[in-house]
Image: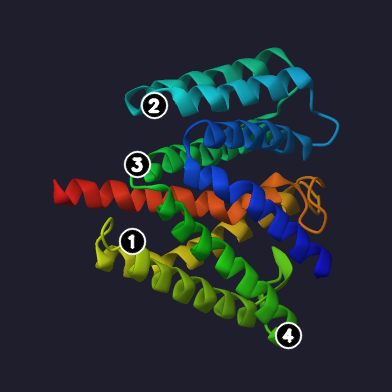
Amino acid sequence: MKQRLITGLIIAAIAIPPLIIGKVPLLLLVFAISALASYEILAVRKDKTSWGLISFLFASTIVMYVVPISFYIPAIIGFLIILFIIHIFTKEISIEDLSYVFVMTMILTLAVKGIIHIYTYGGIVMIYIVLACFGCDTGAYFFGSFFGKHKLIERISPKKTWEGAIGGWVVGAVTSYIFGLYFLTHLIDPNVILFSSITLPIVAQIGDLSFSAVKRQYHVKDFGSIFPGHGGVLDRIDSLLFCLMYFYAILLIVEVVII
């Protein structure tokens, strides 16, 4: 637990400032995460990974980040076609792997698209999302460790409990809502803050369980080992990726309704 806590604080110290500052530091953080995530997405397939495929995946994610939203769908279509070409003419990717790589890349790129859009509201909104996400993660860990008795979904994650899930939701919701009321009401409607604070921790846990299901499918404990006590990059940001996508969707819906 001590190692996990220390590593978590170091990750926060490295990641939060670029998210607040934006611009070049944020771009460097995104590129670094993309490179590591591209490797981890493919590495779970064990002996099937080549540096050529890793480079292609990394390049594809960068292209989908930087293209305007109007070109995002064409970029996705091109990416999908190339994946099928790789499957047809090489043995590097099976149909099962193709589906997995496509879905994981969409999650990664949509989350970063979310960061770009969310950042137009200000870096402080990123803190709000991080509090909802990692507040839930931390709360679930401690409540589960001390009070957990009833298994949540043992088939996917044997250690997670209902007590941990409920405790994590309470911590994430309360923490983010208080923060939102004090710092975000001039940027976002209070009703949106309330709704998001209630639902973001739930989405965070769905993201965590979804990535756990992927690891179960490929029979690995973690996506990587770069962070002691936390595993790889994807192990650390799984729930955050889902929260970024989800909050991005909320903002788009709210903006359309307002217009």
Name the element at disc 2: helix
Residue 146 shows which numbered tag? 4
Spatial separation of the CA atoms under disc 4 and disc 2 = 46 Å
Q: Residue at x 73, y 38 (%)?
A: 40
Q: Is residue 54 above or below residue 203?
A: above
Q: Secondary structure at mark 4?
A: helix
Question: In the figure, is residue 81 to the left or right of 1?
Answer: left
Circle 3 sits on which residue? 120
Q: Amino acid at mark 4?
A: Phe
Label 4 and label 3: CA atoms lie apart by 40 Å
Q: Amino acid at mark 1?
A: Leu
> What amino acid does circle 2 point to?
Ile
Residue 157 image-quadrant placement:
bottom right
How far is the residue under mark 3 from the one under mark 2?
22 Å
- The crowd level at tag 3 (other Cα within 10 Å; few <14, some 14-19, many 20+) is few
Horizontal and vertical percent for residue 172?
51, 71
Residue at left offset 61%, top offset 67%: 137
In the foreground, 113 or 213? 113
Image quarter where the C terminus lies is: top left
Q: Amino acid at mark 3?
A: Thr
Mark 1 to mark 3: distance in Å? 13 Å
* Residue matched to label 2: 73
Label 1, on which residue?
Answer: 184
> Which numbered disc flags the more N-terminal residue, 4 or 3?
3
Label 2: how many residues lie within 10 Å, few (<14), some (14-19) or many (20+)?
few
